[in-house]
Image (cartoon, grey):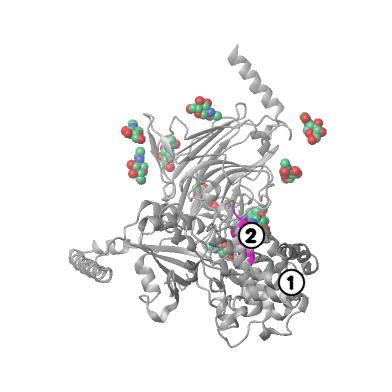
Amino acid sequence: MRPFSAVVRLLLLHLFLSPTSALDFLFNSFTNITNATDLILINDARLDAAAIRLTNDTNQFAVGRVFYPTKIPMKPTSNSTSVTSFSTSFVFSVLPDIASSPGFGLCFVLSNSTSPPNALASQYFGLFTNATVPFVAPLLAVEFDTGQNPEFNDPNGNHIGIDLNNIESAITTPAGYYNSTGGFVPIQMRTGQNVRAWIEFDGTSLEFNVTVAPANVSRPSLPTLTYIDPKIANYVSAEMFVGFSASKTQWIEAQRVLAWSFSNTGIARDINTTNLPVFQLVSPSSSLSSSAIAGISIGCVVFVLILASAFYLYWRKKRTEGEETDDEIEDWELEYWPHRFSNEELREATGGFSTDQLLGSGGFGKVYKGTLSNGTEIAVKCVNHDSKQGLREFMAEIASMGRLQHKNLVQMRGWCRKANELMLVYDYMPNGSLNRWIFDNPKTVLGWERRRRVLADVAEGLNYLHHGWDQMVIHRDIKSSNILLDAEMRGRLGDFGLAKLYQHGEVPHTTRVVGTFGYLAPELATVAAPTAASDVYSFGVVLLEVACGRKPIEMEAAEDEEVLVDWVRKLYFRGRVGEAADPRINGEYEAAEMEIALKLGLACCHPDPQRRPNMREIVAVLVGEAASATAPAHLLSELARGDSSIGGGDGGSDDLSMEVAPPQLQQPLV
Ligand SMILES: *[C@@H]1O[C@H](CO)[C@@H](O)[C@H](O)[C@H]1NC(C)=O
Ligand SMILES: *[C@@H]1O[C@H](CO)[C@@H](O)[C@H](O)[C@H]1NC(C)=O
Ligand SMILES: *[C@@H]1O[C@H](CO)[C@@H](O)[C@H](O)[C@H]1NC(C)=O
Ligand SMILES: *[C@@H]1O[C@H](CO)[C@@H](O)[C@H](O)[C@H]1NC(C)=O
Ligand SMILES: *[C@@H]1O[C@H](CO)[C@@H](O)[C@H](O)[C@H]1NC(C)=O
Ligand SMILES: *[C@@H]1O[C@H](CO)[C@@H](O)[C@H](O)[C@H]1NC(C)=O
Ligand SMILES: *[C@@H]1O[C@H](CO)[C@@H](O)[C@H](O)[C@H]1NC(C)=O
Ligand SMILES: *[C@@H]1O[C@H](CO)[C@@H](O)[C@H](O)[C@H]1NC(C)=O
Ligand SMILES: *[C@@H]1O[C@H](CO)[C@@H](O)[C@H](O)[C@H]1NC(C)=O
Ligand SMILES: *[C@@H]1O[C@H](CO)[C@@H](O)[C@H](O)[C@H]1NC(C)=O
């Protein structure tokens, strides 16, 4: 009885659905594929040597998708809770240009649209949106993720997961398979090796099985991941496109699909993996080895040369490093970091860290200008640290920040560690730091319009650190020398997170105040826990500094005018705040606009952290053109209230000065 009823059900199902809804295809290779007829290639996806390559090398924020040209039925009606079963199998290869700098892998996807609304590139697979735009059209993906994004709770840089309308996976598991005896065999998905995946979805039990294994291993009997979600129908529309998607940042990675089969009527057909192409990076030493086998005599010469140069390199390394050979790469370094440069590479780029290339030096170490062999200009910041443990903790943190990307942050390109010296590689900023433009008498005085734009840029960058991520990132060391100007004279915030380095070196659980004297919020003297509000304070000091053309603390000024914030505040209480403006840009601005900027700076420097505006509000004032009339009124009311609560008048405002900082802070930490 049972098999019979199953047959009847199947028959009924077939009668019920239109004949075109049954879909069963197999691409055992992608030679002779026509775009739009056989498959739809979106954006950067291209046919490439019998495979489909999703992203390209030159487009920094490449996005590529490939879809089967017709939608497949997934639900009988749009509000049905039952979903159609499907089965798919494919072979993919993920090959980063630099093994230690992987990209983000790829996704198998069911999507209501070939171009999902608000889809973002980089770590969002070209599919998902960020937290600020929560709604997306029905989207269901299985990710094969080769990079760790702590902000999305990724467990490691080599996992599979199921994503339901959300870049944060509903479930993840490390990549690997269960062998015939039930042992788990991990696989590395980002070596370029061909990996085969199977996905089975049962629309009745609403169960997913995902299995991955190297392409030359036969299908494991146990799935790698099983996931059941009774609400799956919410992420599925009546008809959906089925395909693949990937995206990247500046870290080059080729994500390829080599073969694909799909069926919604049974198990997807088996892929014949015997003749699939294999993608590997061309090893630079291969030409050397082929010449070596050309003849014994040549081979001998090469051998001797290699021996000699190896000996020379060893000797030079010993000589330059002294006793220190602690340069081995540790696992955690590979796990976290975007791009590891070799010490040699950076040495060459900076002309041997020559003093001619020195851009500056400070408490964190020296900064050199460099040029990579491909012509890219970089800035190399050398940071010394006395404890390896501290360095390790710090790196884990900085590593995740390496993935932060915003037009108003100085982009980190990679790193190199030699013993306890860390070298951080950043984009080179040709116009140097903001303080030089304000104080160092450059040939042209920076006009108000430019100053205001730079302040708005920095506010946007800081707003991104505070609010643009799931985790709030506190900068801790906002000051004009940490603000850099790019080729277009736009402001970018540098050194985010670096200040924390000094904390990690301390005895655990004690927090030492880090930052720079003159920019530190007064509450840090007593609480010593940096917050978003203490960053806002420092930003306020920078704002006043830029508007007034005065350093935060001027030792040469009259005694009661030493501290910039106090001086501006006093002028404000006397109703003459406009007089604080930098006389060098006199007449370039509307008085009302300058007053708003100065008041905003004062509001940021409010002694009570609770009353300072947040970065979102500050951006609204600085970026909004027409905002000048309305926004500040609401914002700056806090300033007025702060005024009354402390009694007002000159005497009262003195209590707010920064001189509450304890003696140990008198030492500049620059
Ligand atoms: C691809 O097409 C060419 C000509 O159009 C044909 O000669 C070749 O056999 C085809 N290759 C495959 C794998 O179908
Ligand atoms: C493929 O076809 C689609 C739809 O016709 C089109 O939008 C897309 O630009 C094409 N892609 C390529 C790589 O030709
Ligand atoms: C990569 O993408 C960019 C922008 O879409 C395009 O200009 C460039 O030609 C592409 N390069 C290759 C090799 O396809
Ligand atoms: C589906 O929802 C629409 C409105 O949202 C309703 O009109 C329709 O009756 C529903 N269909 C079923 C089968 O529940
Ligand atoms: C799916 O896309 C179609 C157009 O292709 C649109 O009409 C429909 O509203 C979309 N469904 C959902 C749930 O977004
Ligand atoms: C299965 O994997 C385990 C380790 O994960 C290994 O010890 C065992 O030998 C493997 N069995 C077979 C049959 O390969
Ligand atoms: C998933 O795998 C389990 C264990 O092998 C199996 O019992 C179940 O039927 C599978 N489900 C699907 C949808 O393939
Ligand atoms: C699969 O291929 C890899 C590399 O080509 C090889 O090391 C491994 O032994 C192969 N495994 C099987 C089961 O053939
Ligand atoms: C797989 O393809 C190869 C040649 O491409 C062929 O010799 C072999 O018989 C095929 N295997 C199966 C199971 O079809
Ligand atoms: C989130 O995405 C929206 C729309 O793409 C964009 O405007 C916004 O800047 C993004 N936010 C972050 C923090 O990346």
Point out the tag, 1 or 2, that comes first from the N-terminus.
1
Depth check: give the residue in front, 484 or 242.
484
Judge from the rendering whether residue 227 lies leftward or rightward of residue 16; answer left or right.
Answer: left
Judge from the rendering whether residue 264 lies leftward or rightward of residue 648; answer left or right.
Answer: left
* Residue at the disc numbered 2: 609
Where residue 531 sits: x, y (%)?
58, 57
Where residue 134 sits: x, y (%)?
67, 48
Q: Is mark 1 within 8 Å of ligand 10?
A: no
Disc 2 residue type?
Answer: Pro
Depth check: give the residue in front, 511 or 581.
511
Where residue 105 sits: x, y (%)?
50, 50
The label shown at residue 622 is none
How far apart are the two marked residues, 1 and 2, measured between alpha carbons?
Answer: 20 Å
* Residue at the disc numbered 1: 596
In what quadrant of the picture does the N terminus appear?
A: top right
Q: Foreground mark, 1 or 2?
A: 2
Name the residue at 61% across, 46% down: 67
Q: Quadrant of residue 479?
A: bottom right
The magenta segment is: 459-469
Q: Quadrant of residue 182?
A: top left
On whether residue 556 falls in the magenta region, the answer is no
Q: Is residue 27 visible?
A: no
Query: Height in image: 320 above or below 26?
Result: below
Name the residue at 71% across, 77% down: 571
Overall secondary structure of the magenta section: helix
Q: Quadrant of residue 628?
A: bottom right
Disc 1 residue type?
Answer: Ile
The furthest residue to the top: 1
Judge from the rendering whether residue 501 lies leftward or rightward of residue 479; answer left or right.
Answer: left
Depth check: give the residue in front, 91 or 317.
317
Q: Quadrant of ligand 6?
A: top left
Q: Is residue 85 visible?
A: yes
